[in-house]
Image (tube, rainbow, N blue to C red):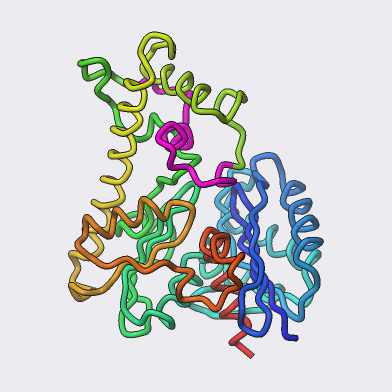
Amino acid sequence: MRAVIGWDIGGAHLKAARVENGRVVEALQIASPLRLGVARVADALTQAAASLGSAERHAVTMTGELADTFAARREGVEALSALAARHLRPLMLYAGRAGFIAPEQASDHVEDIASANWHASAAFVAQGAGTALFADMGSTTTDLVPVRDGAIAATGYTDAERLAAGELVYTGLVRTPVMAMAQHAPVAGQLTPLVNEHFATMADVHRILGGLPEDADQMSTADGRDKTPAASRARLARIVGRDAADLDDAAWAALARWLAEAQIRLVTDAAMLVVSRGCLPADAPVVGAGIGETMLRELARRLGRAYVPFASLLDVAPDAGRWASHCAPAAALAVLASRAG
């Protein structure tokens, strides 16, 4: 049995996927907020490795270098590469456009390694779908990457380039603060300013609407209280200067729908910018991954394109498909590494 494990070290979560003879057999996600220190990632690596078992090869990509734990992205890339090398052996790093490299080469490929997890997913989708708009909505961000004729057709590579190109949208299903969605929202017949405080997140919005996947929200809530619809309504009410008891549940659901609409419009506008470059034919589908797949199905509908689940491109065990999609970069990286020889 040839086993490879792909790892995606993020600023909030560690994601990993195990591939055996080219088939994804397990995938998992562990909360490991880097703002609390690198030790949280080390603990998550130990926990995940105990669950996933040994492997003939480990491959690592990352986005955690952007965390404010580090003074600069170079420091983050070097620190996370060294951490991975201590915990995972034998190890290779994914340097995106530079391919796979040895851990000791990390300092020479900082710009290639930094936040290259999208590149792993897109490279896999390019091999499997040929031509498509790859979309991955996670807890924090949404990637929108065109692939054409088996190759990545993105305009940007770095975070800065991708943000400017609309290929990286800083909105996700869980961690995005509600105050980032708009300046005003309709409440009880009035266009009400939103309070610029971290009172609620989009996890609250999607929980109220019943669209938050099971186990998708692994972070603590904005106020440290329960993860229930009632508690989410209380947090959402604070964003408009109210208590939950001031309005009925239907009114809070209406506000949540408006905010979810604002979020999908943000993603749709970015996707329209990407496809406006003429990089994709009109019949190219949207290949969707991440915990926000329901939102991405709606994106495909709005774009007038077919929707293809990311997991359908994988050879994946039946009980692993959901989490393989949620951890798309890790799953894609494990497959790419297994094919690399």
From the top left corner, tell me how far across and down residue 250 is, in percent: 33, 22
Whether 170 is drawn above or below 93: the answer is above
User: Which quadrant of the figure has residue 89?
Assistant: bottom right
Residue at 47% across / 35% down in the picture? Answer: 207
User: Which quadrant of the figure has residue 52?
Assistant: bottom right
Q: Is residue 334 rendered to the left or right of residue 313? A: right
Residue numbers of the magenta segment: 194-217
Quarter of the figure that contains the C terminus: bottom right
Q: Is residue 201 magenta?
A: yes
From the top left corner, tell me how far across and down residue 28 is, in percent: 65, 58
Q: 217 or 114, which lies in front?
A: 217
Residue 155 in sight: no
From the top left corner, tell me how far across and down residue 168 is, in percent: 38, 56
Residue at 51% across / 66% down in the picture? Answer: 116
Q: In the image as oriented, which residue stretches furthest toward the bottom? A: 341
- Our reading of the magenta stretch's main secondary structure is loop
Whether 200 is drawn above or below 12: the answer is above
Q: Is residue 224 magenta?
A: no
Q: In the image as oriented, which residue stretches furthest toward the front? A: 318
Q: 301 or 75, which lies in front?
A: 301
Q: Is residue 96 rendered to the left or right of residue 218? A: left
Q: Is residue 339 rendered to the left or right of residue 193? A: right
Quarter of the figure that contains the N terminus: bottom right
